Amino acid sequence: MFGNRNIQRGNSTIKTIVNVATIVSSAMACIRFAINGIISAQTAALIMVGVVIFVAIGRSISKIGLTVIAFFLFVLYYSNGDKAMFSQLVTQLLTLFVVLIGIYIMIRGLFKR
């Protein structure tokens, strides 16, 4: 517990680079959304702080949370705030995701030993 500080984790440099890239890309997206008036500056700031917290936590549930937030912002951006278009886009994208996951499972099954 206390004496295990010298244990190295694999690919920590790569993981750090990926985490920084995630923070930078989400910050750029939030700034773009705020400039275009899709979200307010306060909301953009909260999302950026939330992304930093989720990336720092580094657990699978935090990655799922980031994905849900990104999905919501993407659909909100392309629906232009229209509720009917928002629900259509959510339905179409969820269908696309289910199909892609199905293809992934089939291909993984072919090459898995």
Image (tube, grey):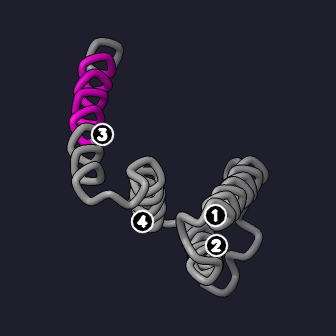
Q: What stretch of residues is rendered in magenta?
A: 94-108
Q: Residue at left 63%, top 60%?
A: 36
Q: Which residue is mark 1?
A: 30
**Which amino acid type is marked by label 2?**
Met
Mark 4 nearby-residue class (10 Å; few <14, some 14–19, many ≥20):
some
Q: Amino acid at mark 1?
A: Cys
Of marks 1 and 2, which one's residue comes earlier in the chain?
1
Amino acid type assigned to the residue bearing label 4 in the image: Gly
- The secondary element bearing badge 3 is classed as helix
Q: Quadrant of residue 104?
A: top left
Q: Quadrant of residue 39?
A: bottom right
Q: Which residue is mark 2?
A: 48
From the viewer's side, name the closer residue of 24 and 102: 24
Circle 2 sits in a helix, a strand or a loop, which is it?
helix
Q: Residues within 10 Å of mark 2 (few under 14, many from 20)?
A: many
Is residue 102 something that shows in the picture? yes
Secondary structure category for the residue under label 1:
helix
What SS does tag 4 mark?
A: helix
Check if residue 96 falls in the magenta segment: yes
The vertical placement of 60 against 109, above or below, is below
Mark 1, Cα crowd under 10 Å, few <14 / some 14-19 / many 20+, is: many
Marked residue nearer the N-terminal end (4 or 2): 2
Between marks 1 and 2, how big is the CA–CA gap?
7 Å
Could you tell me residue 51's position as x and y percent? 59, 70
In the figure, is residue 21 to the left or right of 41? Answer: right
